[in-house]
Amino acid sequence: MTSFNDEVLTMGGVPVSPHLLGMSYGDKYFLDPANGNDSNDGRTPDTAFKSMETAYDALTDNNNDILYYIGGSSSLSLTEQLVWAKSYTHLVGICAPVGPAKRARIFMTSTVTSTPMVQITGTGCVFSNLYFFHGIADASALVCVEVTGGRCFFDNCHFAGIGNATQDAAGACSLKLNGAEECTFSNCQIGLDTQGTRGANSSEILIDGSTKRVKFDSCLIYAYISNASHVLVKLADASAIDRYLWFKDCLFLSQSLNNGTAMTSVVSAPANMVTSYLIRQNSPIVGATAWESNSRGKSYADLPAPAASAGGGIMTNV
């Protein structure tokens, strides 16, 4: 049973949004693509909005408003690009908190080719228990979610880009960080294993714009590939990272048909990347030959190299 009071939304007595507990709450709104109506006030689950566009318009910038997305068998298909520009507003999916492909889903209709599908420019926002999927037959629809805002927190979100083979082009990715700063991705999934046509110019995470002090904690970064040159993390240029990019307790997973294609390098870094730190801590690699095959930049890792029988080790400069 889902219930709501002035303190927290719960499902069977369990808080739906534990990372929002203790905050000074603003207003609460509900979004239900299956049963909602945009003529409603959105204030309760029974009077939920139907479309994301209407629900987002109801939020107030810098007010710590929370939008609860009631998930289910029907997905939410955007009819236009979603730009989340209101700072200190939050989006929480109400569905089973599983990993990939959870049921609070945000898709894009095939008639909309904007890229990115979702652009987050606001500051101090929380996104929890959501599935972002971008898969349309258009070569210009490259990025699933792009983050340019600062100090945002992503909890158990799945970013799944390049869901159609046509999208596999230069600059395509599941998640793009472009000048984002001091964001945290906790228990997130980045990538897709249902579309294996992923080439050398695309990636699952694309870093650009002097992104700084970003941490991935307990995340799964993965892909199903047919091209060994595809990478999971790509640095756009020498100034892609400012200060550090930190992966802690993450799994980097590359899969292929009968495990016949080993990813050459998990990370693609430019030759002149020398000033910032790319940190991998307690984060194993599966199905790839190397962390960064050219040993470029100041990369630190807890394993000297991914080998079939590699065990634990001390963090060292690789």
Image: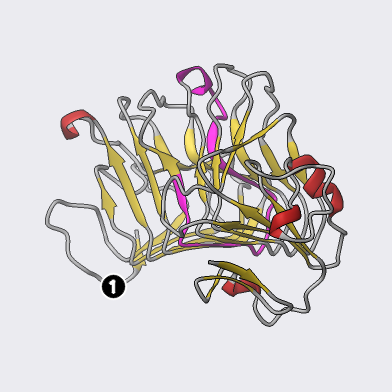
Colour approach in the figure: secondary structure
Q: Residue at x 84, y 53 (%)?
A: 41
Would you name the residue on which mark 1 appears? 314
Q: Quadrant of residue 39?
A: top right
Q: Residue at x 16, y 59 (%)?
A: 310
Name the one closer to the observer, 255 or 284.
255
Q: Is residue 259 left or right of residue 255?
A: left
- Range covered by the magenta-colored residues: 165-190
Secondary structure at badge 1 equals loop
Asked if residue 163 is positioned above or below residue 212 in the image, the reply reads: above
Residue 73 location (% of width, % of height):
50, 41
Asked if residue 85 is positioned above or below residue 154 in the image, the reply reads: above
Name the one closer to the observer, 103 or 189.
103
Q: Is residue 221 left or right of residue 125?
A: left
Q: Residue at x 51, y 56 (%)?
A: 95
Q: Quadrant of residue 231?
A: top left
Residue 190 location (% of width, % of height):
46, 47
Residue 67, can we see it?
A: no
Residue 32 location (% of width, % of height):
66, 47
The single residue placed furthest to the bottom in the displayed view is 22
Callout 1 crowding tier (Cα within 10 Å): few <14, some 14–19, many ≥20 = few
Q: Is residue 253 left or right of residue 131?
A: left
Q: Is residue 291 magenta?
A: no
Residue 280, can we see it?
A: yes
Type of amino acid under label 1: Ile
Q: Residue at x 12, y 57 (%)?
A: 309
Q: Is residue 148 left or right of residue 249?
A: right
Q: Is residue 183 magenta?
A: yes
Q: Quadrant of residue 200?
A: top left
The quadrant in which the C terminus is found is bottom left
